[in-house]
Image (cartoon, coloured by chain):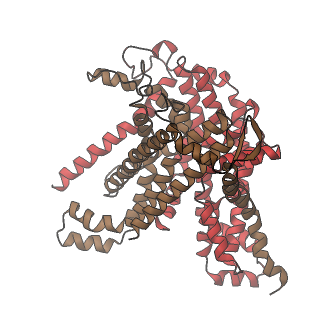
Chain colours: A brown, B red
């Protein structure tokens, strides 16, 4: 083989590998380095501070509040969006009339810009004139401060998050259901197994790899929540919707404490991938 | 439970979900067409008294939406062209060539798939600042020059093409990049389209990255422009805000309705390749 032919694969790879290195891998190292420095308004040149940022982070009560908020958001959105996605995929896989229409409609929020979703949600959950409170009033209930009550706001944001993403999980499950070996399901049907039993003893175990995939994706997505929060509540009221990415953004771009913000980002990265790793280990038992 | 009862129950669930999904969209459209005095009413008005098309004109003029549109189109176009070029070249090498280090490089590409921008943005912000690229089109495009997802997806598609075809093409003096261009890409057309659509929607809708790197109004993209418009107007003209929301969302909704089957295909990959 000529020298040119031996070299050519590397040449084809350079245009993709260089940007991936510069914008995905290098930042991870850079973040770790930054997190060990002080870099803010009072110290515009990075000064080495060792683990001081981490120490400060772990002793900040707000950090634990933010972790708790993130955990609640994850606990609400992951099972809900996946469960809804799976249930609808199963319903739509029965060959019902109109299934294509429902499939398209349920996927529409996924392609809607988050800013558009957030704007509509702001209007619907407006305390005084929003549709949500109008409907509650009509049903005889007192109005709810959807975005300004610190006990409710995160639930509202989670609800909007599920609304926006369950269609994606539905489609992934639908694709998986259509790829299942039909012979097994047919055999169970002929044996007289009822639909509910067929689902739990055959379909559900066969869907395990898909469930693993969507759970990891949903987990990662839930840790990335930011858009709805920044537009609808700015982390408020009194930090009730302050989650990890917003916390990083706040320290990096509102308080300009880049070293401290980097430490949060490193912790978030370790947390997300630690959890994904645990989940994967559990699924591949 | 008989089949008929089961079917009725299925439709009941589907209708309930339809209500929850469609209601906000309906309210968006109806609010966008209402007069200002029909917005703040004691009971909701399900239909506007007339169609107030002027809302769209007024919203359009309320901020530099023309400029945002042009910026969004330029940025997304640049990203798509770059990602398609870099991804297909890399996928070509990874799928069709044997060379030292291929396995490691493939792993590195898959690894990059799971490094989210929500983690790396601080570091990338500082890099761009040091380069003097903040607040420019470069900042909006450069971090998305390559796509791990696109590279991976195209590699899978290129793997499916039989070697015999490449040998035959080589006899006809069509090898290397010629083979990629004349054979692989046309054969992988559905995958190319699926990836293009997913990337198009992701970058057209992207709010997070432009928020980080833009400050000047002249280079803002649509999502940022809309978010700014909302934060300025809030509590007043919901009909105008809804009209603006509609024309920001409309392009992707149209693309989606026209090209649905390719979207669905992109998820087939996600679901099956694990």
Question: Which quadrant is the N terminus of chain B positioned in?
Answer: bottom left
Query: Residue A158 location, x and y as percent?
Result: 43, 40
Q: Count the numbered circles shown.
A: 0
Query: Residue A271 location, x and y as percent?
Result: 51, 54
Query: Residue A5 location, x and y as percent?
Result: 80, 81
Q: Residue furthest top?
A: B37
Q: Tell me the residue at 72%/45% (across/down).
A: B125
B104 to the left or right of B5: right
Q: Tell me the residue at 41%/43% (across/down).
A: A72
Up-down: is A131 above or below B174?
Answer: above
Query: Residue A74 location, x and y as percent?
Result: 43, 47
Which of A204/A247 is in front? A247
Which of A173/B101 is in front? B101
Examine the rendering and report whether any part of residue B255 can be seen: yes
Q: Residue furthest right?
A: A3
Up-down: is B168 above or below A225?
Answer: below
Up-down: is A25 above or below A59?
Answer: below
Which of B35/A206 is in front? A206
Examine the rendering and report whether any part of residue B183 can be seen: no
A149 to the left or right of B193: left
Q: Quadrant of residue A188?
A: bottom left
Q: Tell me the residue at 59%/69% (across/down).
A: B157
Up-down: is B235 above or below B27?
Answer: above
């Amino acid at each position: 083989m000529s020298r040119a032919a031996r070299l050519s694969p590397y040449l084809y790879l350079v245009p993709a590998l260089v940007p991936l290195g510069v914008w995905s891998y290098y930042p991870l190292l850079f973040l770790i380095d930054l997190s060990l420095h002080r870099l803010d308004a009072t110290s515009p040149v990075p000064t080495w501070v060792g683990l001081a940022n981490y120490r400060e982070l772990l002793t900040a009560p707000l950090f634990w509040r933010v972790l708790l908020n993130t955990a609640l958001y994850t606990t609400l959105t992951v099972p809900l969006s996946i469960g809804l996605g799976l249930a609808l995929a199963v319903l739509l896989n029965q060959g019902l009339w109109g299934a294509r229409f429902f499939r398209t409609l349920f996927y529409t929020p996924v392609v809607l810009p988050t800013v558009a979703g957030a704007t509509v949600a702001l209007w619907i959950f407006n305390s005084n004139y929003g549709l949500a409170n109008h409907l509650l009033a009509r049903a005889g209930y007192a109005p709810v401060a959807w975005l300004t009550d610190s006990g409710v706001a995160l639930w509202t944001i989670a609800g909007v998050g599920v609304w926006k993403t369950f269609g994606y999980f539905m489609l992934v499950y639908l694709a998986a259901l259509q790829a299942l070996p039909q012979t097994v399901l047919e055999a169970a049907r002929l044996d007289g197994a009822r639909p509910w039993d067929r689902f739990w003893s055959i379909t559900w175990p066969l869907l395990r790899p898909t469930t693993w995939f969507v759970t990891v994706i949903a987990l990662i997505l839930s840790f990335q929540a930011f858009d709805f929060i920044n537009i609808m509540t700015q982390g408020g009221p009194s930090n009730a919707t302050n989650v990890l990415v917003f916390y990083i953004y706040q320290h990096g771009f509102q308080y300009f404490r880049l070293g401290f913000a980097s430490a949060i980002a490193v912790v978030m990265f370790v947390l997300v991938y630690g959890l994904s790793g645990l989940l994967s280990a559990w699924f591949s038992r | 439970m008989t089949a008929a009862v089961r079917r009725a129950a299925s439709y009941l669930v589907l209708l309930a979900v339809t209500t929850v999904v469609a209601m906000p969209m309906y309210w968006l459209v109806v609010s966008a067409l209402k007069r200002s005095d029909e917005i703040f009413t004691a009971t909701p008005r399900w239909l506007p008294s007339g169609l107030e098309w002027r809302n769209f004109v007024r919203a359009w003029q309320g901020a530099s939406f023309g400029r945002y549109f042009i910026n969004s189109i330029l940025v997304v176009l640049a990203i798509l062209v770059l990602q398609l070029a870099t991804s297909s070249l890399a996928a070509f090498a990874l799928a069709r060539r044997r060379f030292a280090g291929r396995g490691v490089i493939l792993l590195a590409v898959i690894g990059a798939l799971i490094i989210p921008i929500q983690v790396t943005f601080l570091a990338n912000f500082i890099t761009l600042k040091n380069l003097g690229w903040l607040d420019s089109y470069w900042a909006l495009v450069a971090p998305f020059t390559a796509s791990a997802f696109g590279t991976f997806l195209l590699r899978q598609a290129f793997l499916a093409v039989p070697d015999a075809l490449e040998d035959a093409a080589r006899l006809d003096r069509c090898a290397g990049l010629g083979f990629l261009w004349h054979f692989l890409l046309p054969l992988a057309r559905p995958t190319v389209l699926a990836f293009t659509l997913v990337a198009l929607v992701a970058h057209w809708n992207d709010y997070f990255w432009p928020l980080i790197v833009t400050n000047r109004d002249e280079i803002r993209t649509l999502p940022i422009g809309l978010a700014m418009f909302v934060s300025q107007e809030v509590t007043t003209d919901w009909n105008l805000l809804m009209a603006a929301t509609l024309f920001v969302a409309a392009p992707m909704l149209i693309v989606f309705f026209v090209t649905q089957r390719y979207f669905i295909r992109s998820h087939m990959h996600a679901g099956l390749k694990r």
